[in-house]
Amino acid sequence: MNGNPDFPAGPLFGTLSRHWWVVLLFGLFAVAFGVLALMAPVRTAAVLAMWLGVMAIVEGVVALASAVGGSAPVSRGWAVFYALVSIAFGVLAILNPLATASVLLLFLAAWLVVGGIYRIVFAIRVRRHIRGEWLLILSGLLAVALGVMFALNPLGGLMVTSLWIGAMALVYGVLQVVVAFRLRRLGRTAV
């Protein structure tokens, strides 16, 4: 099957079926992360914020190195400025991850409110052309309500968001494990 050029994912299928265990590891990691996120949602938010801080520091160091080395794609001043802001943000995120997560959650809250209002206005404007516009209005109202709740109670919002992330990671992980074993089985039958 994997040697057939008409098979849609021929070479990719062969590689995946031989290395099915990599997909399994991704799935098991996602399941473990999902369980931990469901058990400790606030700690999960803090850890994610810390990882964001680490990534910002690494990016800042790389930008600073490219500015000093003269290989930055922008002016040296902008590259140094960006590098220093990235490093500063990263340090702050590591030193106070819950504050970082809370600020990011406030951006999410603002996005939910704006998106919810947009959906409501959109539904009202197209109500003569579509059916079920009330579903758009309802989704808009729910988004606004969720955004307001997140803004009024950031810690609760962090918990809810971490629980969502945990649940999605758990579902994703289980699906990856199932796919891994199917790839393994299909790889054996394709030989």
Image (cartoon, grey):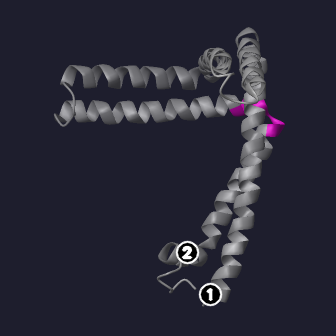
Image: magenta residue range: 38-44
The secondary structure that most of the magenta stretch takes on is helix
Q: Position of residue 63 (x, y in %)?
A: 31, 32
Of the pair 51 and 122, the residue shown nearer to us: 122
Q: Secondary structure at mark 2?
A: helix
Can you identify the residue that label 1 sits on? 190
Question: Mark 1 belongs to which amino acid?
Answer: Ala
Q: Residue furthest top?
A: 152
Q: Residue at x 58, y 31 (%)?
A: 50
Q: Is label 1 in contact with label 2 (beta carbons under 8 Å)?
A: yes
Q: Position of residue 82 (x, y in %)?
A: 33, 23
Q: Residue furthest bottom?
A: 191
Q: Residue at x 30, y 19 (%)?
A: 81
Q: Residue at x 67, y 88 (%)?
A: 189
Question: Is 112 displayed left or right of 31 in the figure?
Answer: left
Q: Secondary structure at mark 1?
A: helix
Q: Position of residue 57 (x, y in %)?
A: 43, 31
Can you identify the residue that label 2 sits on? 13
Q: Is residue 174 inside the magenta stretch?
A: no
Q: Is residue 171 visible?
A: yes
